[in-house]
Amino acid sequence: MAYVQQAAWFWALMLLLQASICSRKRCRPASTPIPVATIYKKLCCKPCASDHAPEEKEEQVIDFNPEFGDDDDCKIFNPKVDGNVDNKMHSDSNGEGSAGYDSGYDSDKDADKDASATPKAKQPPSSVSDLKKHNIIFDFERIIEKMRKEADRSRNIHCKFSGDRLIRTVKDEPNDQHSLYAAEDYVIQGLNIYRAAKKICVLYEQDPSAFEVKAHEFLCYYSDHLEKPEAFWINKIKEINQGVVTYLYKKGFLDANLDAINNNLRIAENYVGLDDTHYNVTTKFKIEGKEFALEDTKWPPLTATQKEAYRNRKSEKYYTRLDPFEQKFIDAYKSELGDDKHYIPTQIRTIPGCRNAYQKRIIAYDQNNHPTVLGRYYHSGSLPSPIQWTDKKTDQKITQDNWAQVQQQDKNVEVISLNYNMDIKGFEQLREKKIVEDTRQVVGNDRFMNLSINGIGTSFNLKNQYNKLLEDSITWYTKNSTDPSINFKKDPKDKSFFMELEKLGEAAQTPELLNNLKQITYISDNPNATTCASYIACKAILSQADPSTTSVLFCCKSGKDRTGIISYLTDATIICKSCPELDIDIDKVCKDLALTRHYQSLACINGGMPGRFGMKPVRNNKACNKFTELLFPRTAELTKIPLIR
């Protein structure tokens, strides 16, 4: 009898225990709790004491579903909070603060502290309602900056941030042993999509919490999938984009179809990039043991007229003709657009101000680390809006004001348009005549040249501009040389420079029609790109040596892809012509420049689009045919993200 009673008690206890376990399973949150130190694996940061969980035999792998369920407003969000939760300012490695929760990405300074040190720990909020109560936010800006730094580290590049200055140093001479692909580029894209969606909700007075939850889940998911191939992350970004667009569509407050919401999300992605710090970027590297630097800095500040156009925007025609969706973003970012600290994003093509505009300097260092500027020039997006507005008067005013902005920086400058001078309906890439002609009308024929670098070539005014360049070069040389004979140049740099001028003259003296025909028929080459880079290099070297000569600004539609490849070829030419003592051919210089990842990085920071590392494919010339994968990585192609049908 006693045995029967003991057995009954035993089974009762077992049933009670099972019921308790089932009850806990039913109450488990939809989002997976964060395993120990998963988000520290890649960034090598020290987790807070409150981040530690009991040891497990096997680490749980995070799963991530980019789709939003009906209960997303009730999902559990378990941010790691260091100390006080009331909008604590967390210092990064450069001493700058940013409001928000710690997110597990401790600063470099914190990472160096004694691992045994135990910070003050408080119970973190466990739900979105607690998130709102304590006013804790997901710190997109700080985490995106950390991801950029980590992506460069994986490419053997050390980054140092100091105020608005970013110094990138290639640790060794560039080599192709370091992969260009970094998962962090795609993580930045995903986070920026969530950041854009959050901003849309804020501007329309909707609850944005679901996007912070998803961003947090995605960040944890990334930490457990670092070794996944690039195709995996491309698909994941498309799924994230699909999930966000579908969620916004179901909410209904945008009153738009899926395609329109998808397009608006890209617009929002560009605007929220203004939340980031925009940098003056310097990349240091070595070629054959000699140190060089590529320096791209902000230029120029908006004019008083342009700033006034933002202050009084609601009475300005450029503003009133825009969709109300974009008007909300201009209202939200009016301060950043006019503060002279931010680049105007490349894809925002409807507002006053030069887009994605940089001043470039190519620098060489001697054995004592003394710098010498080899050449300088400017590059940006097109001065006119590429959009075919019926309101041409407003367009013309924006173009004139942008030209005044350029001249405020440098009155002695000429402009090269890399766009097609044609308008073929049905082919968006062949509808750029408006850009070319609007630029020419504002700048004037004597300061303008057109040299398109894609498959179908168009050109204008190359011969006249070359003749002026040759005349200025001879004047400068004879003024600074004891031997006025151009055919007898003792300095190897002078010889190299005039040899480049002579080669450029062959293209300049060729009839434009024949040059355009070559551009079409030379499938494995890009004659116009070679000619353009040669011309800009000579102008850049001369204007640095003799400031009284005209400098040069070159532009394409966005100032990112065609402009990026011409900047790359120009810099290679400048280094070859200015440093003949290295005795290196342009192929070697082109390879080393591609491996600095400087041009690719400019496309995804500042006026570029976050996470879109690299340039979209444009036609190569012979010098860079071998480096296509380095210059045109797949990350750059997601400036537009198609919906999954």
Image (spheres, helix red, strand yellow):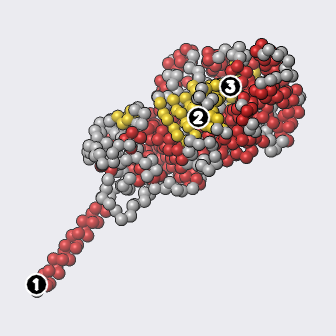
- Find out whether the residues at labels 2 and 1 contact each other: C-beta distance under 8 Å: no
Residue for point 64% across, 19% down: 406
Q: CA distance from mark 1 to mark 3?
A: 98 Å
Q: CA distance from mark 2 to mark 3?
A: 15 Å
In this view of the protein, which residue sits in the foreground, 104 or 240? 104
Within the image, what quadrant is residue 466 found in?
top right
Q: Which percent across, then down, holds residue 620?
A: 75, 41
Q: Which percent across, then down, holds residue 627?
A: 70, 45
In terms of sequence position, does the residue under pointer 2 or pointer 1 come before the other?
1
Residue for point 57% across, 32% down: 282
Q: Which percent across, then down, holds residue 588?
A: 72, 41
Seen in the picture, residue 14 relative to 223 is either above or below; the reply is below
- The three-letter code of the residue at mark 2 reads Thr
Q: Secondary structure at mark 3?
A: strand
Q: Which percent across, then down, holds residue 122?
A: 26, 45
Q: Which residue is mark 3?
A: 375
Q: Which residue is mark 2?
A: 283
Position of the N terminus, as image quadrant, is bottom left
